[in-house]
Amino acid sequence: MKTMTMMEAIKEAMSKKMREDPNVLVFGEDVGAFGGCFGVTAGMFDEFGEERVRDTPISEGAIVGCAVGAAATGLRPIAELMFMDFLTVGMDQLVNQAAKMRYMFGGKIKLPMVVRLPLGAGISAAAQHSQSLEAWITHAPGLKVVYPSTARDAYGLLLKSIEDDNPVMFLEHKLLYGFEDELDENMDPIELGVADIKREGDDITIVATGKMVHEALAAAKTLSDEGIEAEVFDPRTLFPFDKEALFKSLEKTNMALIVTEENKRGSFAGEIAAMIVEDGFDYLDAPVKRVCAMDTPIPFSPVLEKYYLPDADDIVTAVKGMF
């Protein structure tokens, strides 16, 4: 076992696959000698060289389009965008090309590409560099969406994402880069579509993603002191989604609270709620509730940003209001 931050785990997963397969390469803005905007690719340029760790122009459309073309012609590209917000510039290449190409070609090609997307608020990066836009990409059939909350999950899920023959969007919350975890570098890849119970409980299921998993765990500790045992359910992949595991949890707890960092309106949290109501309604003893960010642009001011974001206290308040 080895202790790593999530940043280190992501780098190690990429490096491992690049050592195993010469067709795997990484590219993006400043990922080379500079080591990436958040330092995730630091040192990879020295090991693999400029042909496989490539700096790109400041054009997300070009980066995503290059990934599509490289994947379609036999490579396994890993494209890094500095911020998920800038995926909007590459959405045509992603949604109209990457997501649809295997289907429109009758499955005759593979499209093994990973797009790494740092996202989330909490560092006062303001409205254009802090968004959580997972609902946009989960809406497009043909894309797989992965969202780890720990270094171990990030390592195992990224190994599997690089092996996958479909486009995978790999979400990395910026505030989780420094979170440490113990992992075995020889561990098997983690299958996509398999959720993880981060804390077991009998009274309510809290479905949380990304950094909100840690807020949910903190809330669960507080609730336990007051006699409410919450189960913290981490989907790990948003698509494919592990509905079977979720319903197994709900069969035990009979209550569901969904916590994400997205703006509440149109959020993927709403999609999870719909899954529960459509297919798991008989398990419920109370209405499904959501805790999400406010429906406003993300403030720059640290005080306002903290007010904007959901946290453990908000989760505790929501859970108590359900009993």
Image (cartoon, grey):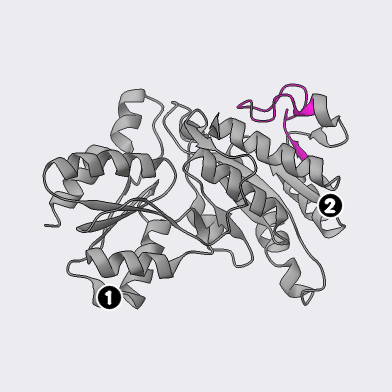
The answer to which quarter of the image holds residue 203 is: bottom left
- In front here: 16 or 112? 16
- Residue furthest to the front: 1
Residue 201 on image: x %, y %: 25, 54
Taking the image as shown, residue 77 lies to the left or right of residue 37, namely: right
| Residue at the (48%, 56%) spot, across then down | 135
Judge whether residue 209 can be spotted in this image: yes
- In front here: 207 or 139? 207
Give the residue type at disc 1: Phe
Element class at badge 2 = loop
Tag 1 residue: 281
Q: The C terminus lies in which quarter of the figure?
A: bottom left
Taking the image as shown, residue 115 lies to the left or right of residue 230, namely: right
Label 1, label 2: how many angstroms apart (C-alpha)?
44 Å
| Residue at the (58%, 37%) spot, across then down | 83
Judge whether residue 173 can be spotted in this image: no
Q: Earlier in the sequence, mark 1 or mark 2?
A: 2
Q: Main secondary structure of the magenta part?
A: loop
Residue 28 on image: x %, y %: 73, 36
- In front here: 253 or 313? 253
Tag 2 residue: 75
Would residue 262 be counted in the magenta stretch?
Answer: no
| Residue at the (50%, 35%) spot, across then down | 182
Element class at badge 1 = helix
Give the residue type at disc 2: Leu
Q: The N terminus lies in which quarter of the figure?
A: top right
| Residue at the (47%, 38%) spot, across then down | 120
Badge 2: residue crowd in 10 Å (few <14, some 14–19, many ≥20)? many
- Looking at the rendering, the stretch of residues picked out in magenta corresponds to 25-45
